[in-house]
């Protein structure tokens, strides 16, 4: 195992300003935290974070990254919390460790190959600071190196597949070729050991065979470059990796014998001018192979890769692929983003330690890409910032626009799930349906067959699918409500006149109403667009003044409504089965609750508004008898969904308000709003909205409040 001082020395060798104290503390902190834990290999667990940290020193990463590597498994695998980390190492390290911990929790969720790309996006989206990703990649590399100690072959295979599909692909994306090669080779060994064996055997054979030829080519090129004034150029052979050879054979359906270009040459020179100079020497000396010249110096690849590529017929008339680049380009090609960063740091041009420098630099690199495909690929990175990726309980990944809620999630799963959704769990905890989803959330939708979409969902869903499904549902059910309401209104009105309403009576008069179906007429009656008087006149062919439904109620103004006066001719229309907010609304002035005597007022375009019989607002409708509808509560009201408002004076003393809320809670009333109207030295004057089952429930609460000493007065509030 690497010792503490070795690690610190290594870091100081490339970063003299490294925070030695913090590195030492992190080393000890992690050692203590992991204590006697063991790896599958039998090694002390602590050797793992140290190895990961050491790997990152290869990429000359900063103190924060190395400290994060040392701490990366403490939160997931030990008692240590993120708060502990922050207390000892500060906010920056906390955020980095948090990021790595989150990524670790995602592992093993990419079983399905189709999920791999989504998963990759998720990883990028979640590691807002790309150092998180670098630590995670080094972590995966060490886990792959010690993969053989895991006993279950299925688990080994899964990890290896995930490594190729996701981590190696990610390493390539950010230009870390070296790391990508290592990850691929380790996974290759696990997944296809025989294929790898035979590729390596063949490579060895070809290498031996071509060794002499290659040596000759190298020495000729070296001589030519020296003659041209480039004696310091380094030239060496570079072999393709077994995994990429095998992939190429697979994808191009090639036989091994057809693979001649297993070895290329690389020329490393001092600066860009020398790159083109060297290219000139080579092209002047040998025949170039058409179509193989690429200038990635003037047009770098999206991951920052720069180099000149060419292929010539070499000294022995055999094909030689040549890459020409500077030292810096070479390191960026191998170490990608990490090298890019190290270079800038070394030149101390930028050392502001800002967290998002990684992203900026990556985007910098990406901006340089020239062709549209590359650009599209690159802008995806930025697009992820507008997206959240969430898991289904089975581990499938779904992408949403930022701001999406569990209702959006439910509709994305299936419109049936959306329509019957009653609640949601995020990461195992019940949350309100309007909660905004976050990256990596696991969302579990709770459904109930009897549930239907709520019109209020339309206000907070963000996906087009959820919006249109909710709207569609509300539209159709609202119409059904209006139709039912219209039918009930007409039945009642006709009965008052001693007639019986039959729908077919409307049929012959459809042209008069300019409607296609009877239902259309009923819907408009329910919505208040056609008055019941009109229907009576047209259908019965007579003019009769329509009476208010509680017949005679309107003979004098408001006061008589407070007296009990039943309609003798017909029973009130039950509002049973009608959903508040659609065709039925409860008036905000008097807050009717079951048990109150109520009356409905037909409101154009809105259906019926329910008021209590003694609501003063009713006076406004005294000259519109045709708008009055006698309504009654449905029988079994078991849900506490109606809001009653109470008005109270409470002593201004400690815990007085607590007493009030306790009484309400004990009586199972749910406070939906609380307002202090006045506060003096002696008392609070308050308004409380309480969700109750019915009038009895509310009166019970009021009685219990009155029994409390701190409550000076309390009564139901109806304006
Ligand atoms: Mn780890």
Image (cartoon, rainbow, N blue to C red):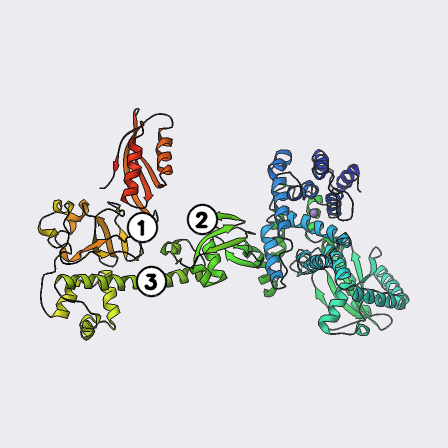
Question: Which tag, 2 or 1, sits closer to the chain's start?
Answer: 2
Disc 3 vs disc 1: which is toward the camera? Answer: 1
In the shown orientation, is residue 549 left or right of residue 141?
A: left
Q: Which residue is drawn at the image coordinates 49% and 55% (left, top)?
A: 445
Question: Which tag, 3 or 1, sits closer to the chain's start?
Answer: 3
Residue 500, by quadrant, is: bottom left
Mark 1 lies on residue: 637
Mark 3 lies on residue: 477
**SS at mark 3 in the image:** helix
**Residue 594: where, in percent of width, then height?**
27, 48
In the image, the residue with mark 1 has its CB under 8 Å from the nearest atom of ligand 1: no
In the image, the residue with mark 3 has its CB under 8 Å from the nearest atom of ligand 1: no
Q: Residues within 10 Å of mark 2 (few under 14, many from 20)?
A: some
CA distance for labels 3 and 1: 22 Å
Question: Which tag, 3 or 2, sits closer to the chain's start?
Answer: 2
CA distance for labels 2 and 1: 24 Å
The reply to whether residue 438 is visible in this rendering is: yes
**SS at mark 2 in the image:** loop
CA distance for labels 3 and 2: 24 Å
Residue 507, by quadrant, is: bottom left
The reply to whether residue 305 is visible in this rendering is: no
Quick one: quadrant of the C terminus?
A: top left
Q: Residues within 10 Å of mark 3 (few under 14, many from 20)?
A: some
Disc 2 vs disc 1: which is toward the camera? Answer: 1
């Amino acid at each position: 195992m690497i010792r503490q001082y070795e690690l610190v020395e290594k870091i100081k060798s490339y970063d003299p300003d490294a925070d030695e104290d913090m590195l030492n503390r992190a080393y000890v902190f992690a050692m203590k935290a992991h204590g006697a834990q063991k790896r599958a290999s039998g090694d002390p667990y602590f050797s793992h974070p140290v190895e990961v940290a050491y790997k990152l020193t290869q990429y000359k990463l900063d103190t924060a990254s190395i400290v994060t590597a040392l701490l990366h498994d403490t939160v997931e695998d030990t008692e240590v919390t993120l708060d502990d980390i922050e207390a000892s190492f500060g906010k920056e390290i906390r955020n980095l460790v948090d990021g790595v911990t989150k990524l670790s929790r995602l592992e093993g969720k990419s079983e399905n190959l189709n999920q791999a790309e989504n998963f990759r996006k998720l990883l990028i989206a979640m590691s807002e600071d790309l150092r998180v990703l670098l630590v995670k990649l080094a972590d995966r590399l060490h886990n792959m190196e010690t993969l053989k100690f895991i006993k279950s072959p299925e688990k080994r295979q899964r990890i290896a597949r995930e490594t190729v599909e996701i981590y190696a692909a990610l390493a390539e994306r950010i230009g870390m070729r070296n790391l990508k090669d290592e990850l691929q080779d380790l996974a290759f060994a696990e997944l296809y050991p025989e294929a790898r064996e035979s590729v390596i055997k063949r490579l060895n054979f070809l290498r031996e065979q071509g060794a002499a030829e290659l040596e000759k080519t190298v020495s000729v090129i070296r001589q030519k470059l020296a003659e041209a004034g480039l004696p310091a150029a380094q030239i060496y052979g570079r072999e393709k990796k077994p995994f990429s050879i095998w992939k190429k054979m697979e994808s191009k359906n090639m036989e091994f014998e057809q693979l001649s270009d297993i070895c290329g040459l690389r020329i490393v020179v001092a600066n860009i001018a020398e790159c083109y100079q060297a290219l000139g020497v080579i092209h002047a000396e040998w025949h170039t192979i058409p179509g193989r010249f690429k200038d990635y110096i003037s047009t770098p690849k999206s991951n920052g890769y720069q180099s000149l590529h060419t292929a010539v017929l070499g000294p022995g008339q055999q094909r030689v692929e040549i890459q020409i680049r500077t030292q810096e380009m070479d390191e960026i090609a191998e170490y990608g983003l990490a090298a890019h960063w190290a270079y800038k740091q070394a030149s101390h041009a930028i050392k502001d330690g800002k967290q998002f420098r990684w992203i900026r630099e990556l985007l910098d690199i990406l901006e340089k890409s020239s062709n549209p495909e590359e650009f599209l690929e690159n802008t995806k990175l930025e697009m992820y910032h507008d997206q959240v990726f969430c898991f289904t309980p089975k581990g499938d990944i779904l992408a949403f626009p930022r701001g999406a809620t569990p209702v959006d999630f439910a509709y994305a799963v299936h419109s049936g799930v959306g329509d019957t959704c009653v609640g949601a769990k995020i990461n195992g905890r019940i949350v309100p349906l309007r909660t905004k989803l976050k990256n990596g959330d696991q969302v579990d939708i709770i459904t109930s067959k009897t549930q239907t979409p709520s019109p209020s969902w339309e206000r907070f869903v963000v996906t087009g699918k959820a919006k249109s499904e909710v709207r569609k549902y509300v539209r159709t059910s609202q119409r059904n409500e209006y139709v039912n309401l219209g039918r009930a209104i007409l039945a009642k009105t006709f009965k008052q006149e001693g007639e019986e309403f039959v729908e077919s009576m409307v049929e012959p008069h459809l042209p008069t109403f300019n409607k296609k179906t009877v239902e259309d007429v009923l819907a408009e009656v329910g919505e208040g667009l056609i008055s019941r008087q009109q229907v009576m006149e047209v259908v019965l062919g007579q003019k009769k003044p329509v009476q208010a439904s509680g017949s005679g109620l309107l003979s004098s103004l408001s006061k008589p409504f407070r007296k009990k006066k039943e309609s003798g001719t017909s029973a009130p229309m039950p509002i049973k089965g009608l959903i508040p907010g659609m065709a039925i609304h409860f008036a905000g002035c008097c807050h009717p609750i079951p048990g109150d005597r109520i009356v409905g007022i037909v409101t154009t375009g809105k259906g019926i508004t329910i008021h209590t019989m003694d609501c003063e607002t009713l006076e406004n409708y005294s000259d519109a008898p045709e708008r009055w509808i006698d309504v009654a509560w449905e029988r079994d009201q078991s849900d506490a969904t109606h809001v009653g408002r109470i008005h109270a004076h409470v002593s201004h003393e400690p815990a007085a308000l607590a007493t009030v809320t306790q009484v309400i809670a004990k009586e199972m009333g749910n406070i939906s709003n609380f307002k202090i109207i006045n506060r003096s030295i002696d008392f609070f004057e308050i308004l409380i909205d309480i969700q109750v089952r019915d009038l009895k429930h509310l009166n019970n609460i009021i009685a219990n409040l009155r029994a409390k000493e701190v409550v000076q007065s309390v009564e139901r509030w109806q304006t």
